[in-house]
């Protein structure tokens, strides 16, 4: 019997594991990939904390509330910002190699959405360095990992989570994990924008889809952040730090057209408007000089050389917006609790209201650390040896075993890979930076076709061991599961707010200063707006 079962091995999951390990030896991390492959490595720019004399915790709180556009949870925001300094100290103490200034203090840079120099960084490898350090600490502390396991379904009885089922990618077997508490830290759903995202193709909203099937409520699924600067044609991220260090956004003739450090949604829309008008848009860093670029952005300079055959110090870099981060997710309170007993969620898979309608740059890494700890602290307090009554070989396990066997036996009529590409393009064009009811309605109508055609899809590769075709089909099924909650949330919010921009409703409407919840009940998808409650 597992005391604390954590699903996901990014920074949120690893932080939760380290925190839980302080109070119980029986901590297990289950992950679809290996920890060092997690999406956390994409967070290049920095992690926020008010450390310098010109910045204050209250200013950080105010900036985050402003970015949330009146639908943030102010209690969650205060917890985030008030714990930022301790989070940085902890990361520094366990060995994260932060860049240093001339006084050997942790170096900080400005990111968009604030006038403060607040983001602590490690060159342009901040997320990667944090992740590797956390993983090292997990190994040092003897935390048990089950890698290459894809969560299939949660085992829920009488509104209480009892564990989960998983697909062993290495062997093709179905496994059952019984646990007193489960923490979901599975990341976002930005990968559904296939070919139009900075996310890995594995970031397919598995946690959100699995939670939805189990009766968990999802919140504000319409809020998807698009990063302004990814390399044109391949969506490789060029961090906000490039603009924070002084980079310009320009047309081919060198003319600037937007304040580069405005909130991401405004900058991304300004870029796409120009592109739609026939302009090519570039990131111009030439004036920074080779030494500054190599010091502050070595990884990005290498990526530009490798994938574009260009150099930041001498060339204009062609860029394009792409889906990057999802503010929507599993609804939690400030204790990381969901509406299912003993089930917690933290990191990008969760939504406690800390980002509201638009995430502030530098707050995502901070959220992983602060609420990863909080999830573990509350789960540990909930360990109770006497009230666990679930037997192995559960009904859910039997159902999932049959589901997997049926997939192997099934004949294939339609290619789900082609559908996945089409869905990515449709989402970017119609539920992307610019949204309109006519286009949204078209997608909703197509979702029914996608659902029906799923019955004609399956796998060509029938092997058991490391069957990538099988894993990607399971991911595709999760994508289909999430399409309707996302599209209906987009359709029903008839206003523009933060990252959600409706061409047909361009203004913010106070009657929508509420959270949008979606959940499954008796097989029916429900959607409703609720007042935002604290705690």
Image (tube, rainbow, N blue to C red):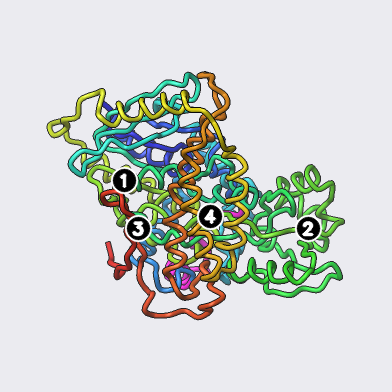
Name the residue beneath numbered marker 4: 325
| Distance from Cα at disc 4 to Cα at disc 2 | 21 Å
- Please name whichever residue, 108 or 486, is drawn nearer the observer in this view of the structure: 486
Q: Residue furthest left?
A: 386
Callout 4: 10 Å neighbours few (<14), some, many (20+)?
many
Q: Which mark is residue 344?
A: 1
**Residue 91 at x, y = what percent?**
48, 45
Callout 2: 10 Å neighbours few (<14), some, many (20+)?
many
**Residue 80 at x, y = what percent?**
40, 58
Q: Is residue 447 left or right of residue 259?
A: left
- Please name whichever residue, 3 or 456, is drawn nearer the observer in this view of the structure: 456
**Image quadrant where one finds the N terminus:** top left
| Distance from Cα at disc 1 to Cα at disc 4 | 20 Å
Callout 1: 10 Å neighbours few (<14), some, many (20+)?
many
| Distance from Cα at disc 3 to Cα at disc 1 | 18 Å
Quick one: SS at disc 4? strand
Q: Is residue 70 left or right of residue 250?
A: left
Task: Please tell me which of labels 1 and 4 falls first in the chain.
Answer: 4
**Residue 162 at x, y = what percent?**
24, 35
Name the residue beneath numbered marker 3: 518
Task: Please tell me which of labels 3 and 1 falls first in the chain.
Answer: 1
| Distance from Cα at disc 3 to Cα at disc 2 | 38 Å
Name the residue beneath numbered marker 2: 318
């Amino acid at each position: 019997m597992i005391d604390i079962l954590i699903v996901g091995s990014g920074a949120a999951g690893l932080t939760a594991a380290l925190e839980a390990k302080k109070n119980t030896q029986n901590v297990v991390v289950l992950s679809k990939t290996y920890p060092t492959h997690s999406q956390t490595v994409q967070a290049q720019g920095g992690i926020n904390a008010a450390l310098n004399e010109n910045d204050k915790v209250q200013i950080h709180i105010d900036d985050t509330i402003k970015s949330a556009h009146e639908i943030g949870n102010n209690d969650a925001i205060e917890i985030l910002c008030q714990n930022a300094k301790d989070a940085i100290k902890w990361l520094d103490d366990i060995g994260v190699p932060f860049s240093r200034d001339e006084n050997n203090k942790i170096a900080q840079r400005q990111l968009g959405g604030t006038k403060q120099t607040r983001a602590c960084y490690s060159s342009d490898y901040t997320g990667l360095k944090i992740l590797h350090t956390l993983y090292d600490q997990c190994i040092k502390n003897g935390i048990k990992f089950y890698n290459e396991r894809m969560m299939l379904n949660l085992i829920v009885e009488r509104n209480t989570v009892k564990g989960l089922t998983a697909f062993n990618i290495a062997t093709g077997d179905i496994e059952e994990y019984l646990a007193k508490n489960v923490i979901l830290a599975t990341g976002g759903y930005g990968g559904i924008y296939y070919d139009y995202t900075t996310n890995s193709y594995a970031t397919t909203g598995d946690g959100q889809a699995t939670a939805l099937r189990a009766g968990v409520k999802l919140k504000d699924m319409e809020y998807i952040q698009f990063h302004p600067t990814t390399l044109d044609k391949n969506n490789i991220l060029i961090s906000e730090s490039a603009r924070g260090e002084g980079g310009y956004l320009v047309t081919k003739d060198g003319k600037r057209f937007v304040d580069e450090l405005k909130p991401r949604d405004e900058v991304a829309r300004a870029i796409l408007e120009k592109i739609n008008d026939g302009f090519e848009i570039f990131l111009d860093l030439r004036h920074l000089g080779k030494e500054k670029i190599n010091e502050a952005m070595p990884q990005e300079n290498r990526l530009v050389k490798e994938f574009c055959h260009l150099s930041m110090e001498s060339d204009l870099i062609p860029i394009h917006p792409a889906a990057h981060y999802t503010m929507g997710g599993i609804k939690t309170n400030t204790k990381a609790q969901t509406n299912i007993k003993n089930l917690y969620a933290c990191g990008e898979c969760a939504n406690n209201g800390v980002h509201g309608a638009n995430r502030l740059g530098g707050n995502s890494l901070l959220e992983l650390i602060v609420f990863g700890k909080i999830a573990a602290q509350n789960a540990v307090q909930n360990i109770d040896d006497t009230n666990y009554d679930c037997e192995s070989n559960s009904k859910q396990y039997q159902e999932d075993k049959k589901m997997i066997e049926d997939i192997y036996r099934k004949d294939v009529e339609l290619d789900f890979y082609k559908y996945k590409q089409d869905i990515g393009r449709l989402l970017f064009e119609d539920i992307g930076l610019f949204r309109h009811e006519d286009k949204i309605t078209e997608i909703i109508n197509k979702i029914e076709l996608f659902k029906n055609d799923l019955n004609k899809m399956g796998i060509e590769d029938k092997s058991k061991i490391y069957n990538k075709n099988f894993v990607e089909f399971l991911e595709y099924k999760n994508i289909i599961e999430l399409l309707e909650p996302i599209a209906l949330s987009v359709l029903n919010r008839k206003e523009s707010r933060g990252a959600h921009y409706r061409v047909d409703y361009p203004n913010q409407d106070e009657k929508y200063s509420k959270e949008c919840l979606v959940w499954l009940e008796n097989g029916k998808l429900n959607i409703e707006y609720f007042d935002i409650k604290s705690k």
